[in-house]
Amino acid sequence: MNLPSYRTDYISEQDYLEGEKISTIKHEYIDGEVYAMAGASKNHQRLVTMLSRRFSEHFDNTACEVFSSDIKVHVDSKYFYPDVVVVCSNDDDDDPYFTKSPRIIIEVLSSSTRKQDRTLKRYLYQMIPSLEEYVLIEQDFVQIELCRKSENWMPDFYFLGDDVTFASVGLTLPVSEIYQRVENDDMRAFFAARS
């Protein structure tokens, strides 16, 4: 006789959200399952810090704010911690721990996250009505992929010597400035060519 099998590892959204408030490590939540997040490299953090700082400066006296790594994005029955998320108060839903209304989401790619950031997260994020731009940034070499809702989510790629325009908030940054403290072969060659 075959007995029905029941999942014993399922966690409700409410239990997940309450647990995250007291957890010493961050977890992402996908359809009742939680996944611990790994630590980030120095290059990863350099990119997140640079972008957060430039966006924050740009948002002085505006309705927009930038959050890095600790604010969740809620989409469908999932919660993710993007590396950088831009939220504008006229779009937000006022929850103190997550947003359903990001304007821009930025993910810094690593070997362990690249596949999920390019597939599952890309698909889910692009379902968010308020999202206007999704950005994927490589840390091991210089490449920024920017997908805009206004361009049917088709990617544009940016490299050293290019400027990137985040049209949804009217901010343009040189790629070299975004990567200026990152240590990889592309940046070493860039600085060597300038000296």
Image (spheres, rainbow, N blue to C red):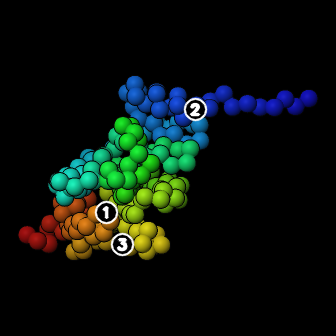
Residue ID for mark 3: 157
Mark 1: secondary structure: loop
Q: Residues within 10 Å of mark 3 (few under 14, many from 20)?
A: some
Query: Measured from the top left, where is residue 128 in percent x and y?
Result: 48, 56
Spot the residue most to the right.
1
Spot the residue most to the left.
195
Q: Residue at x 56, y 44 (%)?
A: 77
Q: Is residue 30 left or right of residue 73?
A: right
Q: Residues within 10 Å of mark 1 (few under 14, many from 20)?
A: some
Instruction: Compare residues 146 and 127 and report the one nearer the observer.
Output: 127
Q: Quadrant of the C terminus?
A: bottom left
Q: Quadrant of residue 147?
A: bottom left
Do the numbered discs 1 and 3 sit on residues whose CB atoms are within 8 Å?
Answer: no
Instruction: Compare residues 18 and 33 and report the one nearer the observer.
Output: 18
Q: Quadrant of residue 136?
A: bottom left
Q: Which mark is nearer the camera, 3 or 2? A: 2
Q: Residues within 10 Å of mark 2 (few under 14, many from 20)?
A: some
Q: Residue at x 43, y 74 (%)?
A: 151
Residue ID for mark 1: 141
Mark 2: secondary structure: loop
Do the numbered discs 2 and 1 sit on residues whose CB atoms are within 8 Å?
Answer: no
Q: Which mark is nearer the camera, 2 or 1? A: 2
Query: Measured from the top left, where is residue 22 in percent x and y?
Result: 40, 25
Residue ID for mark 2: 12
As drawn, 41 above or below 3 = below
Do the numbered discs 3 and 2 sit on residues whose CB atoms are within 8 Å?
Answer: no
